[in-house]
């Protein structure tokens, strides 16, 4: 691991130790965030998987009825029947926060509350298969909306999981080892300097003692 390019002083040692404590705490928090994001992501994916199966089943039934209606009615009749819809849908988007990720909440608002307004035509010139196809699409629409909400949320959570994973790895495999190696190097340098100072002080003390002994010998002579 690389060491930080800093001067081996006690002030730098204290600063890096503080940085190591912050990085260690941040690493723990980010791991907890990553784990919670993964839990939320898996829950969403499980719900999306079940919901997709229901949506595909509903769309398959609607397409089947529409195909039957197309074999019975002329294309011009179907196009004319669906040309001017009575109902209108507006989409409202709200947000829900999941571990600092604002995932969308889709809400559909119908222009009218009458259920029969999904049929934009009279019943005189159309068959029941077309009615079933339209009602099937209308009934599966809330599920499609929820599915799109779940899939967009999963996409956003996956991106945040990847970003959090990179931060965790950077702290775990780069920053924290670098801080520890630098602390070790500075500590060794400071210990070495302290030992050198101790040796110098002992030498000075020995020299002073020798000078005192020599001075006493001169006085006695």
Image (tube, helix red, strand yellow):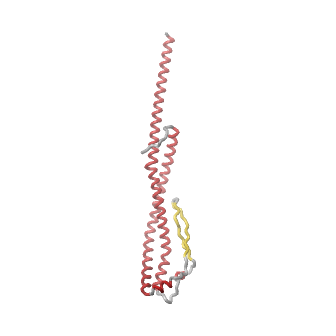
Task: Name the residue located 46 percent from the left edge and 81 percent from the top edge.
Answer: 133
151, 35: nearer the viewer:
151
Given the current orientation, which residue lies at the most extreme right position?
A: 112
Given the current orientation, which residue lies at the most extreme bottom position?
A: 124
Q: Quadrant of residue 52?
A: bottom left
How many labels were placed on the picture? 0
The image shows residue 17 at horizontal and vertical percentages of 50, 43
Q: Quadrant of residue 114?
A: bottom right
Image height check: is 165 above or below 55?
Answer: above
Image height check: is 120 above or below 49?
Answer: below
Task: Name the residue located 48 percent from the left edge and 73 percent from the top edge.
Answer: 144
Q: Is residue 71 left or right of residue 86?
A: left
The image shows residue 202 at horizontal and vertical percentages of 47, 25
Given the current orientation, which residue lies at the most extreme top position?
A: 221
The image shows residue 117 at horizontal and vertical percentages of 54, 82
Q: Quadrant of the N terminus?
A: top left
Image height check: is 133 above or below 190?
Answer: below
The image shows residue 178 at horizontal and vertical percentages of 45, 45
């Amino acid at each position: 691991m690389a060491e930080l390019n800093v001067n081996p002083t006690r002030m730098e040692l204290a600063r890096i130790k503080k940085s190591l404590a912050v990085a260690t705490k941040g690493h723990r928090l980010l791991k907890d965030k990553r784990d919670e994001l993964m839990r939320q992501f898996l829950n969403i994916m499980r719900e999306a998987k079940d919901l997709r199966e229901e949506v595909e089943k509903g769309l398959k039934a609607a397409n089947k009825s529409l195909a039957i209606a197309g074999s019975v009615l002329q294309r011009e009749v179907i196009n004319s029947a669906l040309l001017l819809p009575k109902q209108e849908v507006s989409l409202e988007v709200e947000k829900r926060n999941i571990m600092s990720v604002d995932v969308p909440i889709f809400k559909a608002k119908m222009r009218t509350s009458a259920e029969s307004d999904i049929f934009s035509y009279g019943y005189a010139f159309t068959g029941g298969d077309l009615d079933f196809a339209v009602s099937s699409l209308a009934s599966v629409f809330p599920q499609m909306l929820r599915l799109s909400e779940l899939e967009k949320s999963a996409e956003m959570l996956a991106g945040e999981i990847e970003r959090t994973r990179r931060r965790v790895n950077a702290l775990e495999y780069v920053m924290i080892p670098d801080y520890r190696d630098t602390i070790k190097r500075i500590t060794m340098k400071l210990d070495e300097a302290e030992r050198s100072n101790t040796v110098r002080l002992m030498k000075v003390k020995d020299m002073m003692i020798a000078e005192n002994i020599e001075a006493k010998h001169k006085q006695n002579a």
